[in-house]
Image (cartoon, rainbow, N blue to C red):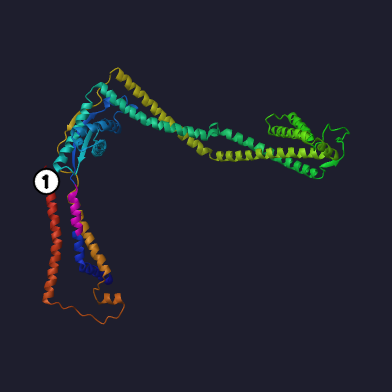
Amino acid sequence: MTSVYDQILGTLYGIWRRRWYGIATMWAVCLLGWGIVAAIPDTYEATARIYVDTNEALKDYVEGGQSNNVLKQVDVVKRTLINHANLERVIRRTDLDLTASNESDTEKLIDQLAENISLKNQGEDLFTISYKSGARRLTTQENANLAKRVVQNLINIFVEDNMGGKRDTLNGVIRFLDERLNDLKGQLEQYEKAKADFERANKGFLEGPDNYQTRLSTARTEVAQLEQRLTELRSSRSALSAQLGSIPATIPGSTFVFQQAGGTTGGYREDPNSTAGRIEVMQRQLTEDFAKGLTENHPDVVTIKSQISQLQKQLELEKRSAPKKAAAENAASQSNPVYVQTKMQLIQKDTDLHATEARYAQLKGEISSLDGKTETMPSTAAEKSKVDRDYEVTRHSYDEMLQKREKAKQALAAETGAEPFHIRIIDAPEVPLKPVAPNRPLLLSGVIIAGLILGIAASFILSQIHTTYLNVNKLRDGLNIPVLGSVSAILTEQQRNQARMWLSMFLLAFGSLVVIYGVLMAIEITQRSTAI
């Protein structure tokens, strides 16, 4: 407990020794802060209360027929009163346009006017219109008068615009409905796009969840069949490849006759290894493909036809260039017909194998895609419900609003209806006597408190930088060396007088600051109690 007490005393003693730095900081903060507070212009607010009966005009056109909806009433009155055209008229009537040199300045004035105008509802059909003016270029009297004139002109324009009778009434209602229709149209277009995007991305799901299961089951059945077919093709190809390796490609002889197992000729008139023989083999293969039911557009048929065409061109060249050499080579050796036939069968197997593998890979990818879509089916269904619900609700609201606008147009054509608003001024705007901002007494008090806190903080920080030991124990603990004793200071009368003088000067400096604060507070209170 004694240690804490000594520590507190040491801290206070250090702050007291650096008190002049603290009082200087306090003076600097207070003078700067009070200067800023004094530079803030006074803001005056003029207020008026009006009674506006919106029920008569809106009972047939506002959504749901609920003309007593406070939010809708405020929205209608605000759109009617605080629009760009009316604000431009207010600027001209209050001579604010004289300060604008171009259209950009005028637009800035309109934006500032709209920001400072407030329209609040104080109950059913009772509204408060207020405007705040705190321009630096104007005096306090001019700001107060400007606030009153803006509010008064707003009310005048509102009354003038709504004294035109039934045609102006319905025109205002139609404008209101057009704005609501534009808002709903934008929302409806967004929901229509979202619905179209969803249907495009989930076309299969929209055909029904069962369609996914049917396609998945069919694909899996075909994959099983293709796996069996691939096994057969690979086995058959391996056997043909092994058989081909054991058959010689050519045989000697001058005359080629291919004997079948039954002892009859195979019907080949040419050497299958020659160009003409290869053409004959491929033509027979093409005939067999047609017999199997393949069409002209089948890849195998197109490939064989292309090869036949190329071989025919090669045969013509051989006949023109070296007929004797071709005959001699043909007589010297002949192609083995068994080798050629086995080679053609191997080529056919390779073609079938590649086609089957491609189809197998395609089906595996389709099954993977369908499995993923099946897992996300619940979330997709929820998303579809949300998209449909948003679209239907917005479309229903848009159709209702469209019908109401058509009804209002028909009423306008027939010149029927009533005045849109029955207006009665409850409290006319008056010149405000006191500014609503800034709250200078509060700001002045905040400045002196901030100055006091910052002054103490400055003294404390400096005391920590330049350490002072209050007693022998603090010195012994701080230096960690033996301290034999201490010598008390003996002050002379002159030193005591000098210390009292410095204390008086410190108290005078602090008291002067408090006196200045009191004078400023008195001035503010006096000004607030005095009417403009």
For the point 13% across and 55% down, the residue is: 518
Q: Quadrant of residue 419?
A: top left
Query: Is residue 11 shown above or below 134?
Result: below
Q: Nearer the viewer, residue 270 or 321?
A: 321
- Give the percent coordinates (x, y) of residue 223: 66, 38
| Picture mark count | 1
Q: Nearer the viewer, residue 432 or 462?
A: 462
- Give the percent coordinates (x, y) of residue 461: 26, 65
- Give the percent coordinates (x, y) of residue 467: 26, 71
Query: Is residue 90 shown above or below 41?
Result: above
Residue 414 within the segment the image draws in magenta? no
Q: Nearer the viewer, residue 440 or 60?
A: 440
Q: Amino acid at mark 1?
A: Ser
Query: What residue is pinned by disc 1?
Result: 529
Q: Is residue 105 left or right of residue 359?
A: left
For the point 18% across and 49% down, the residue is: 39
SS at mark 1 in the image:
helix
Query: Is residue 477 shown above or below 394?
Result: below
Q: Quadrant of residue 22?
A: bottom left
Quarter of the image with the N terminus is bottom left
Q: Is residue 179 visible?
A: yes
Quarter of the image with the C terminus is top left
Please identify the residue farthest to the right as the structure is shown. Answer: 263
Q: Is residue 379 left or right of residue 284?
A: left
Number of residues whose C-alpha sits closer than 10 Å to that of mark 1, classed few (under 14), some (14–19) or many (20 or more): few
Please identify the dominant SS of the magenta region: helix
What range of the chain is rendered magenta?
28-40
- Give the percent coordinates (x, y) of residue 84: 27, 32
Please identify the residue farthest to the top as the structure is shown. Answer: 414
Q: Is residue 229 visible?
A: no
